[in-house]
Amino acid sequence: MGINNTLKALADPIRRDILNYLKEGRMSAGEIVEKFPVTGASISRHLSVLKDADLIRDTREGKFIFYELNASVLEEIMLWITDLKGESYND
């Protein structure tokens, strides 16, 4: 996916909060919904945007869907930002 989709996905505070929760480990959709004062449909849309940007992955287990971070895309963004700053990634 392009960097535009990634940056758009990261622009929303709820989506950033979802990513912060997922850095602790995978979570079911229901567990994620419980963390926010918005509807399940709204969280579902946020998860869809994050998935389309390849920032998260989902796995179906029975009737549950579990989400986890896709760290490789985040790493690519970090490298790109570091390059913009004119630094090496290991500085």
Image (tube, grey):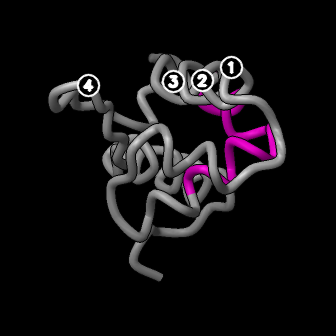
Q: Secondary structure at mark 1?
A: helix
Q: Earlier in the sequence, mark 4 or mark 2?
A: 2
Q: Earlier in the sequence, mark 1 or mark 4?
A: 1
* Neighbour tally class for label 2: few under 14, some 14-19, many 20 plus, Cα within 10 Å: some
Q: Earlier in the sequence, mark 4 or mark 3?
A: 3
Q: Which residue is mark 3?
A: 53
The CA distance from mark 3 to mark 1 is 19 Å
Q: Nearer the viewer, residue 73 or 49?
A: 49
Under mark 1, the amino acid is Ala
Q: Is residue 57 left or right of residue 80?
A: left
Q: Secondary structure at mark 3?
A: loop
> Can you say whether 31 is above or below 85 in the image?
above
Q: Earlier in the sequence, mark 3 or mark 1?
A: 1
Mark 2 and mark 1 in contact? Answer it, CB < 8 Å. yes
Q: Which residue is mark 4?
A: 63
The label on residue 41 is 1
In this rendering, the label closer to the viewer, 3 or 1:
1
The spot of residue 5 in percent (x, y) is: 62, 20
* Neighbour tally class for label 3: few under 14, some 14-19, many 20 plus, Cα within 10 Å: many
